Image (spheres, rainbow, N blue to C red):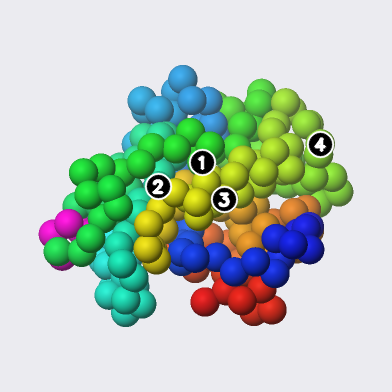
Amino acid sequence: MCAASAAVTPLRHNYYALRHGQSLANVEGVISSDPAVACNHHGLSETGLQQARRAAEAVCAEALSTGVDGVAIVSSDFKRAWQTAQAVHTAVISRGLSCVPASAVCAETLLRERSFGTLSGGPDSRYADVWVHDAVSATHTEFGSEPVTSVRERAWGVVERLEAELPGRCMVVLVAHGDVLQILQTRFACVDPRTHRSLPHLETATLRRLSLPLAAGAG
């Protein structure tokens, strides 16, 4: 769970999870967590591209309504996430909003999909086999999968770095993958990481605000 000091420290920036749009791996019903494959293949389907453009409009609307100084788009370098992030960047620039940095999406390998070990490349019905173990242990490595604790630590490390590096008050859009983002949400919510699958399911191309508990002073 959260360290007491971290739980009461307000965040300077506003953080949002954005899961990638529908990917070709989603269409094929396969798990795609191997960087050697997913960085170059399994990009967005035509439906996914449309979803990404709609999500981009949602990002712009949120940025305008919250009056932030700029939008920082930080993305997994897996193709499906990267294409989603590019759609957001295009929309932000076309709306005349400030993008931080202005020239590009920030690629972040620490936001890559959770490794599902020997299950990668197999049917996505096997996700449930890993999640059963997640509910019991946040440190398990069944099927060679990455422990929940590892995912949470690396994703939260991105947040900590962005807090220190980004200027002003930004809307930070973390474009990544379902497990990564829901596990990260447990850190924002200060709840047991084993419960990540009990959170509302993050659908493809869905924007979700990530906030610390109210007692932590999140704005």
Please name the amino acid that badge 2 sits on.
Val
Q: Nearer the viewer, residue 31 or 89?
A: 89
Q: Tag 1 or tag 2, which sits nearer the N-term?
A: 2
Q: CA distance from mark 3 to mark 1?
A: 13 Å
Q: Nearer the viewer, mark 3 or mark 1?
A: 3
The residue at 31%/67% (across/down) is 69
Q: Nearer the viewer, residue 3 or 153?
A: 3
Disc 2 vs disc 1: Cβ atoms closer than 8 Å?
Answer: yes
Disc 2 vs disc 3: Cβ atoms closer than 8 Å?
Answer: no
The range drawn in magenta is 91-95
Q: Main secondary structure of the magenta part?
A: helix
Q: Which residue is mark 3?
A: 160
Disc 3 vs disc 1: Cβ atoms closer than 8 Å?
Answer: no
Residue 1's disc is none
The residue at 72%/43% (across/down) is 148
Please name the amino acid that badge 1 sits on.
Leu
Q: Tag 4 or tag 1, which sits nearer the N-term?
A: 1
Q: Is residue 23 visible?
A: no
SS class, disc 1 = helix
Instruction: Provide residue 144's location: percent of width, then percent of height.
Output: 72, 26
The residue at 73%/37% (across/down) is 147
SS class, disc 4 = loop
Residue 140's disc is 4
Please name the amino acid that badge 3 sits on.
Glu
Q: Which residue is mark 2?
A: 74
